[in-house]
Amino acid sequence: MNTPLEYSSWDVRPTSAAGFIRVCKEASDDPSAFAQFRKQPWMINATAGIPEVMENRIWHQLNSVCNEWFESNRKAIKQCDAVGGPRQNEQHGMLSPEMIRYAYRAFCLTSVFGSMNGLNVVEIGGGFGALAAVLCMTENIASYTIVDLPAVLRLQRKYLEEVGVSTECLFVATEQVADCIWKPDLVISDCALSELTDETRDLYAEHIIASSPCGSMKFNSSRRTMPPVPLIEWLATVIPHAIHRGNYFDVLVAPEDRNLSAKKRQEKYPDITVGVFWGAP
């Protein structure tokens, strides 16, 4: 079966891709659909697919080791979560599962790279735009570029406008990547590289990843086509000085399990992510 061109660069199940793209299109075109798009199953599966135990651990981290950052940015994070009809959790400060995950991701990025003030940031694969929103609302970023599928870019643009992001946001479709001049200060990707075709991954590596002095890539560990170890080996050919952190969100692993072998840890935590970064101070 041929994969439709509108998501041919995305190496996931065709039904999942088609469902997600449909939600993006409907939300972009119909105000009533946009008002509730984050409750749609295809959107939830694509952007909020973390087990409840991990959601609880992230919430605990935001209110302990991340507390100072979280409290100073709570208002901005809630503003990002007020758009699109999210499934908010009363036990988690009326924030959605995906928003606390993206908030924690933003905290991790600023912990590794420091202030993003004045930086030109590029994100490969932006979901519905939540990470972009949190970073732009909590950091004085010069410009934020998202590279994604055309239908998804339309939703991201609409979402970021509704949130009230004032940062200059640029939206680049996959087929436009080779025609752009890339000079990012920081490139990030939140599991997208794990879900791309080899051809698209190489395209992004040549034009975007290799041109950035700093970067952070987070990978899904449950991907069947490109699991973390081959991805890390591949990335090492692009960025020889990249540092493999093991479990990027190691804090989500229960303390008593942190000495487990990599194989046993992945068996117990199949959805844990691993990450690589480079250029951090």
Image (cartoon, rainbow, N blue to C red):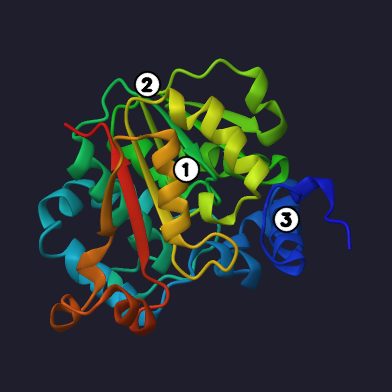
Depth check: 155 or 104 in front? 104
Q: Which residue is mark 3?
A: 21
Q: Which residue is mark 1?
A: 163
Q: Residues within 10 Å of mark 3 (few under 14, many from 20)?
A: many
Q: Which residue is mark 2?
A: 142
Does residue 279 appear to the left or right of 102 in the view shown?
A: left
Q: Residue at x 16, y 49 (%)?
A: 69
Q: Which mark is residue 48?
A: none
Q: Nearer the viewer, mark 3 or mark 1?
A: 3
Q: Residues within 10 Å of mark 2 (few under 14, many from 20)?
A: some
- Residue 137: x and y in percent read 34, 38
Residue 138 quadrant: top left
- Secondary structure under tag 3 reads helix
Q: Is residue 74 above or below residue 111?
A: below
- Residue 119: x and y in percent read 33, 23
Distance, label 2 to label 3, CA atoms, is: 29 Å
Does residue 60 appear to the left or right of 100 in the view shown?
A: left
Depth check: 214 or 225 in front? 225
Query: Does the CB distance between marks 3 and 1 fall below 8 Å?
Result: no
Q: Amino acid at mark 3?
A: Ile
Q: Amino acid at mark 2?
A: Ala
Q: How many marks?
A: 3
Q: Nearer the viewer, mark 2 or mark 1?
A: 2
Q: Residue at x 42, y 70 (%)?
A: 88
- Residue 78: x and y in percent read 35, 54
Q: Residue furthest top?
A: 181
Mark 3 or mark 1: which comes first in sequence?
Answer: 3
Quadrant including the N terminus: bottom right
Residue 120 quadrant: top left
Mark 2 or mark 1: which comes first in sequence?
Answer: 2
